[in-house]
Image (cartoon, grey):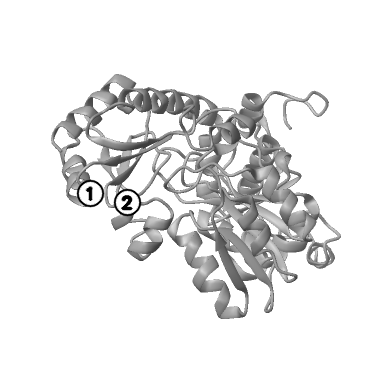
Amino acid sequence: MSASAKKTYRPETRLVQSGTLRSPFGETSEALFLTQGYVYDSAAQAEARFKGEDPGYQYSRFANPTVDMFERRIAAFEGAEAARATATGMAAVTLSLVGQLKAGDHVVACKAMFGSCRYVVEDYLPRFGVASTLVDGCNLDAWRAAIRPNTKTCFLETPTNPVLEVIDIAAVAKIAHDAGATLVVDNVFATPMFQSPLALGADCVVYSATKHIDGQGRCLGGVVLGSQKFIMDKIHVLLRQTGPSMSPFNAWVLLKGLETLAVRVRRQTDSAATLAVALAEHPKISRLIYPGRPDHPQAAVAQKQMRGGSTLVGFEVKGGKRGAFRFLDALKLVRISNNLGDAKSLVTHPATTTHQRLTPAQRAEIGISDGFVRVSVGLEHPDDIVEDVVAALDAV
């Protein structure tokens, strides 16, 4: 850490200061190194670099100073020994699983997850001889029953996308570890501000940095975090050789995003809680889900493992798809988009967007009805957000 190698700073300070590498010019802001390759002082130095005997850079697919700063900063904030940045969040998820698995292995995963994550587990991995079992993530007995002798890893999101279930990370980690397996946690919805999966027993944490870490709708990115051994044994070589690397420009943008992450996420979470309170008894809503509320189905788990609620609010609009579409089309401030974690408030209809490839029965099984919508609360004034959502519900 640039500020001091001795003092342990608080999370907000680490988000601003950690991992900075200054050039001889002594710049204040992190430098953007837009370069593909690097030159060597001698042929012997080039040989030493490729043997791993010299710590310098070789090629930006392998490592880059700006990307390195992003990895160091997010690792310091997460409390992880190591991190590797990727081009997208889905690249991070795929690397975290593929890096551990081979033909004949088995994965257990929560049914309620982002559509692309479910595709990787349910459709992509089986092409290479890796079987999978999907379970109700909140049912610990279901996790235990799904474990096989060849189970190598478990995967979950919490809170889940899009229905905001909260899964007991420590309990699932123990089940996985008792079976000799690992646990990978997608922590996007909680953000590293409000949940620390590694401290709860997870072996690996993944993020779509596209979401809250950038938080301003600018670029794509992902990151995989874990112990030094996990990253070096499972992720490092695969990332180097297959190439889903983060661009230096995106790493620079994400570094700037990290500086304001704490301020943004706290404000968005406060506003999301305000929206949830305003909608709790609304007559046009049949179900409201927000992890910070005592009426959340897993409120006790959320209170135990989360330090805050979420920037996301989910609710079911009466009238099914027709009612949901009337609501969406009546919004003026909150815009329709399948993204989340942005400075702008966004709303999506999962049944026809992020989870449309699932069958109606599969969607119903994880709580995605035709009337369900997910609101990602932004940085606008909370009263404006509430007024817009309530006015749109009046149109249903």
Mark before the other along the chain sequence, 2 or 1: 1
For residue 243, side relative to residue 281 (left or right): right
> Badge 2: few (under 14), some or many (20 or more) residues near its Cα, within 10 Å?
many
On the rendered image, what quadrant is the N terminus found in? top right
From the viewer's side, name the closer residue of 207 and 13: 207
Residue at 66 percent of width and 42 percent of height: 197
Question: In this rendering, is residue 107 above or below 76?
Answer: below
Residue at 50 percent of width and 30 percent of height: 309
For residue 96, side relative to residue 384 (left or right): right
Residue 115 horizontal/vertical position (percent) = 43, 59
For residue 388, side relative to residue 80 (left or right): left
Label 1 sits on a secondary structure element that is: helix
Q: What is the number of the mark on residue 369? A: 2
Tell me which corner region of the image, top left, top right, bottom left or bottom right, holds residue 8. top right
Label 2 sits on a secondary structure element that is: loop
| Residue 234 appears in the figure | yes
For residue 359, side relative to residue 76 (left or right): left
Residue 190 horizontal/vertical position (percent) = 54, 38
From the viewer's side, name the closer residue of 4 and 144: 144
Disc 2 and disc 1 in contact, CB within 8 angstroms: yes
Residue 12 horizontal/vertical position (percent) = 62, 25
Residue 343 horizontal/vertical position (percent) = 38, 33
Question: In this rendering, is residue 139 above or below 97?
Answer: above
Residue at 18 percent of width and 33 percent of height: 392
Residue at 48 percent of width and 40 percent of height: 214
Q: Which residue is mark 1?
A: 320
| Residue 62 appears in the figure | no
Question: In this rendering, is residue 181 above or below 256?
Answer: below
